Amino acid sequence: RLGEKVKESHEKSRGSYGARRILKDLLDDEESISRARVGRLMKQLKSFFHTLKTELIYHRRYQTRQQAKQDIFEYIEVFYNRQRRHSTIGYQTPLDYDKAYRDVA
């Protein structure tokens, strides 16, 4: 559900990702989110954007915005979610973690 809201926020902002923008859209939703949850979300968003920049963006030069969008999409969907292992979820990929969570639930 949270992932869907982040995606909606990204689409509303016409592709200009930013942790503050995404968090603002989440908070404007009618559901209330605790301050502790807001803090965790902000920390996770900042961590993700830091990783995206250091592992991808700072190592590339793009001729067009479309090239950058395509490269970022591929990084997230192909590498980050399916191949990159994350220490915070037991050195699993997010895809494997989600599968395991669904199997348990």
Image: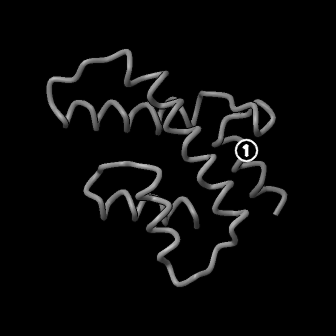
**Going 61% across and 27% down the picture, which residue do you hit?**
84
Q: Residue furthest left?
A: 64
For the N terminus, the image quarter is bottom right
Along the line of sight, the residue nearer the viewer: 42 or 11: 42
Along the line of sight, the residue nearer the viewer: 21 or 93: 21
Residue 86, placed above or below residue 56: below
Place of residue 76 in the rendered image (x, y in percent of width and height, measured from the top left): 47, 37
Along the line of sight, the residue nearer the viewer: 91 or 60: 60
Q: Quadrant of residue 25?
A: bottom left
- The colour mode here is one colour
Look at label 1 and name its amino acid.
Tyr
Residue 63 as seen in the image, left or right of residue 6? left
Q: Residue furthest bottom?
A: 30
Q: Residues within 10 Å of mark 1 (few under 14, many from 20)?
A: some
Q: Which residue is mark 1?
A: 97
**Going 77% across and 39% down the picture, which residue do you hit?**
89
How many marks are shown on the rendered structure? 1
Residue 89, placed above or below residue 67: below
Place of residue 10 in the rendered image (x, y in percent of width and height, measured from the top left): 37, 57
Place of residue 61 in the rendered image (x, y in percent of width and height, measured from the top left): 25, 18
Residue 52 as seen in the image, left or right of residue 64? right
Q: Quadrant of residue 37?
A: bottom right
**Going 49% across and 21% down the picture, which residue do you hit?**
55
For the C terminus, the image quarter is bottom right
SS state under label 1: helix
**Going 55% across and 42% down the picture, which residue do you hit?**
46
Q: Residue furthest right?
A: 104
